[in-house]
Amino acid sequence: MGKPKYILLVRHGESEGNCDKSVNRHTPNHKICLTSQGHEQARRAGLVLREFLEQFGEKDGVNARSVLFYTSPYLRARQTCHDIIEGIKDLEGVQYQVKEEARMREQDFGNFQSTPEEMEKIWAQRAHYGHFFFRIPHGESAADVYDRIASFNETLFRQFHQDKFPNVLVLVTHGIWARVFLMKWFRWSYEDFESLRNIPHCHFLIMKQQKTGRYLLKTPLKTWDDLRDSDVEEEISKEFTQEVNFNSMNKLDNPDDMDIHSIIRAQVEAIEENRHKDRQIRENYKNTLVNKLSQADQSLQNSTEDVSNIAMSRQFFVGGNFKMNGTKESVKKIVEGLNAADLPSNVQVVIAPPATYIAIAVSENKQKTVEVAGQNVFNKSSGAYTGEISPDQLKDLGATWTLTGHSERRTIIKESDEFIAEKTKFALEQGLSVILCIGETLEERKAGVTLDVCARQLDAVSKIVSDWTNIVVAYEPVWAIGTGLAATPDDAQETHKQIRAHLAKTIGEDAAKKVRILYGGSVNGKNAPEFRDKADVDGFLVGGASLKPEFVDIIKSRM
């Protein structure tokens, strides 16, 4: 039977999600990568593992420096495994192989995490309920992870029967997974699990096989008792790194001379001692989080009321983009129909006919029911720019608004984020208001980078435009434009909320609260009412439907 002499557990390096919890709101957990600090931690761990392997010489056998890596399939774990291997791959006599194992993945915390207020409430509930049995909404409990590990261990035990199983088994995984693995392996209780803290990033836990064939944990996990009462709050989310000197570990008193009963008794006594010391601090911690749960409830209620009031203060906006459609007569009829429709006074309506018909739309708008926009604008006042139209020319025709950044100009005309930002800035400076269009393609949506794309497009503008008073943002998922497909109202609300949160970081919270964000993905008379009451959906930018009578129904959906 070829059981490994050592089993090493190592947690992945520092990830983007460890540094910025908001990443979990828009990036799938399995795609979260290491930070530069995380890569450095992993490289140092590789050097530490190299030092550990160097202790094995010819006397230990030809297989002494053989290593089997099992890694979680999550990107941050695979990156950690790669960086660790870089530290040992040129070591003389080393042999290694790598296997990805889906059962070693992180505890599932749901596909995407919600707002900080809602997540704080969930974490407080988990602390009150107990980390092991609490199931994250749409995710897993640690007990579910336990079941995965039980299956994984059965696989390991079968492999241990191989004659030439590697001397060292390295499990590159996640904090909670490592704790549950040890809980299962050493038959720890639920209370033991609750009392232990996660291992630091790229810190090794060492299990060494004894003469009896059993394993002894030589680097115990820290407990909450290791923290001072006054530091509990600060340390809950604190991540730290620690070098491990394997040689010093091996200089500890060798328990091989102890009988198995003494070993087990010593481990049980240590656990009981930790449990006794730890009880009061865990009780204090629980009380603290119960109070935070109550505060989170009140904060969430107040936040909901505030959001509702702010949303009500943003005037509903409906824009109609005719694109390259219509004639003089059809544009006249559309404007006449809008004038006769008794539109609600609390809705701002802006139409964008082709540039050739802007003057007609303005002249027919006798009751000033609507405002008129250009579909495009250039970033110069005049000059040798064939086919372009300047802000002054739009204003001369009677337009007060213009679109910038529409997806069709981004994809067909290949307008860059920077060029769109320049056009937006110049239009504002020349006295036009701007409907700034942003949005992701279907491929980008499938890749889970919707917010990254929108943030990039917004950042190009916020870098050169400080006053957003006269900007309306239109979120147009490119995959939904003209396809008849539409995001669900909840999806649209979540994306709009993330866009507003990002704007709060770049242009300021107060300014972001005032910016109107429109939804523009195949809106029609039937689905408009489903979107209208969402807190962060401040109106619509309508395409094909703006040429039809149902445009009036969309405008009136706010009544």
Image (cartoon, grey):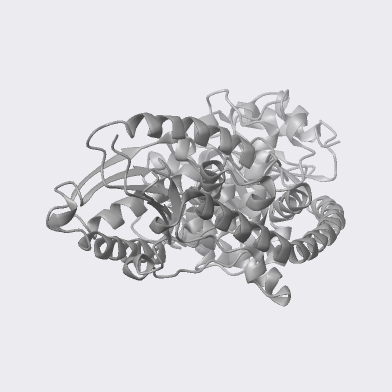
Residue 372 % position (x, y): 65, 46
Question: Residue 23 at what x, y percent from top left?
Answer: 54, 53
Up/down of 166 relative to 330, above or below:
below
In the rendered image, residue 394, in percent from the top left (x then y), is placed at 55, 53
The residue lying at 50 percent from left, 54 percent from top is 263
Please state if 299 lies on the left or on the right of 388 as rendered.
right
Of 517 and 327, nearer the camera is 517
Closer to the camera, 292 or 218? 218
Left or right? Give the position of 368 relative to 491.
right
Q: Which quadrant is home to the N terminus?
A: top left
Q: Is residue 435 left or right of residue 85?
A: right
Q: Look at 57% across and 37% down and name the residue there.
A: 146
Q: Position of residue 143 (x, y in %)?
A: 63, 38
Quadrant housing the C terminus: top right
Nearest to the observer: residue 504 or residue 556: 504
Residue at (45% x, 56% y) in the render? 258
On screen, residue 243 above or below 215 = below
Q: Is residue 337 visible in this depiction of the protein?
A: no
Res 180 quadrant in image: top right
Camera sees residue 426: yes
Identified at 62% across, 44% down, the residue is: 495
In this view, 153 is above or below 302: above
